[in-house]
Amino acid sequence: MSHRFPPLVVIVLSAVALAACGSSEIRPEEGPPLDANGQPIVQPVTIDGPQTGLEIDPDSLAGRAPRERVIYFDYDQSALRPEFLDIVARHGRYLAQNPDGRVRLEGHTDERGSREYNIALGESRAETVSRMLQLQGVGGDQVRTISYGEELPVDEAHNSEAWAKNRRVNVIYETSAALN
Amino acid sequence: MIAVSLVASPARAVIEIEITQGGDNAIPIAIVPFGGNGPDDTPADIAGIVSADLQRSGNFAPLNRQDLVATPVSGDRPRFANWRLTGADFLLIGAVRSDGNGFAVEFQLYDVVQQSLMIGYRFPVTDQTFRSVAHRIADEVYEEILGVPGAFNTQIAFVSVEGRTGDRTYRLELADADGEGAREMLKSPTPILSPSWAPDGVRIAYVSFEDRTRSAIYIQDRERGVREKVVSREGINGAPSFSPDGQRLALTLSEQGSPDIHVLDIASGRLTRVTDNAAIDTEAVWLDDETIVFTSDRSGGPQIYEVPVRGGRARRVTFDGKYNASPTVSPDGSTIAFVHGVDGRFQIASIDRASGVFRTLTQGTLDESPTFSPNGQMILYATEKNGRGTLGAVSLDGNVVQSLTLDDGSFREPAWSPYAE
């Protein structure tokens, strides 16, 4: 439905209606500068990717490291479960014998609760493994930690099986390290 | 149940806003389609946008268009007796007029019961600003009737994720507060986390994992597309939050052992440690320029605490339940909202700082990342629906609930902008 009036009539009618109550205010433009779509300006930034993992040479330090490289945790816990002590110990011995070996410990959590608290929880899990390795004589410079919290689930289902798989520390051998 | 589908700009497909629960005492208002001699192709239905805004607030019940008894436009004298019969307490009429070399939108808001004009304004408008002028009109109506500023002409930032394990795309996006026009601010193959607005509404801080071996906190200027890596230490670089004066960033670092709250002076790059504790301290937000609210598990499980930014003794704020995290402070500082975990469910709850009264606001099982609207009336949060991340909104009294769904991919971590300076 359209309403068209001669401009003069419009101005007079508006003036009468508004003057009666004294509020014929003209509001200036305000707010942020707008783009061609009438929205606040956004200049996007793109980070290149994906950067998928490199093939690991089986004869390299990384390739000969112990095979089991995932350590699982209980809900809201960062203490090592007894069944994983042996796996961590094997990595500890290997790294102590190969001082050029470098590992990155990636801590992860399940999706429940707050994201940044989960970053802290994942870091705490990675730190637990890091301390265990260093108790075996692994040098502090051989181990780095990073926590992804709940951001990189291996199973995206919303159930207890998926959550158990996602609460983990991945032991990742840096591939650039040369073999002894 | 009312569903309003809104078509977004080409940057993104459809965001659907669904009002799943309306307010009990919504005010009836008649909003008449704007008349006038605007551009032949008026790019937006102004009355429709105002109506959808007011309806989403939960405070208003706009009349259906077929129930409008007449179609007066800006400048007409309404026949109040007829409008009273519709049950409307208020009447909004308007028009688009040519205004010398451009156009202007004018409107009048009437009190139907008092039969009087409440406000009447005229806004210059261009093809590009129709939507934002419509939101400003909704803000004016909201404030005139309720005495509280509206927050319709604002933005939301959020993180979206597409794809599966090993091949995900993360985006930091911005959309209008009504879900329109989502557009990309940052795109990355690695996680983006914890967007936080500066009070200028232009800079946003966030965490990025793009370096793979170490996380980093960036500050990005959305208008210029320029960003700066401000912190990247060994361990956690997390939970950035701009101070009210915009000069400092509270954040979490674990370089010296356990996660602790630090404050970065942005101009000088100087870091000051605020908490020093063997437990987890993280998720700092500012109550005011002198006080930080944060999550700590120093008592066993995560709880909310307050601490002076200069350091000192932390005061515990939450005592209900074993899991309270991810605090956010209302603009007036009176209320803290947070994630409350109970019996394996995670919901949004609030606590009144003066009285200590605790209240659960949502009924989900995976609700997280609460953020206040800049007028303090609504809380936007992340939730899960049909296995996908969506956004929900709830009024502070828990009465009005809405959900926002992206047509594909998942939403998370909403952050409602401040008012533009």
Image: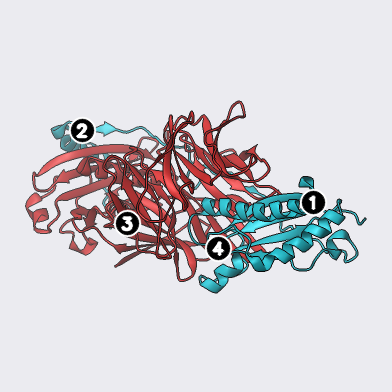
Chain colours: A cyan, B red
What residue is drawn where x is 32% and y is 59%?
B401
The quarter holding residue A50 reads bottom right
Separation of disc 2 and disc 4 at Cα? Answer: 57 Å
Q: Type of residue at label 4?
A: Asp
Secondary structure, mark 4, is loop
Of tags 2 and 3, the one toward the viewer is 3
Of tags 2 and 1, the one toward the viewer is 1
Marked residue nearer the N-terminal end (4 or 1): 4
What residue is drawn where x is 80% and y is 52%?
A102
Secondary structure, mark 3, is strand
Circle 4/circle 1 CB separation < 8 Å: no
Q: Residues within 10 Å of mark 4 (few under 14, many from 20)?
A: many
Callout 2: residue from which chain?
A
Which disc number belongs to residue A137? 1
**Does any portion of residue A49 appear in the rendered image?**
yes
On the image, the x and y values in percent for residue B72 come to 19, 51
Secondary structure, mark 1, is loop
Residue for badge 4: A110
Marked residue nearer the N-terminal end (2 or 4): 2
Of tags 3 and 1, the one toward the viewer is 1
Q: Please determine whether, in this image, residue A24 is positioned above or below residue A116.
A: above
Residue for badge 3: B360
Secondary structure, mark 2, is loop
Callout 3: residue from which chain?
B
Circle 3/circle 1 CB separation < 8 Å: no
- In front here: B420 or A126? A126
Q: Are marks 2 and 1 on the same chain?
A: yes
Residue for badge 2: A23
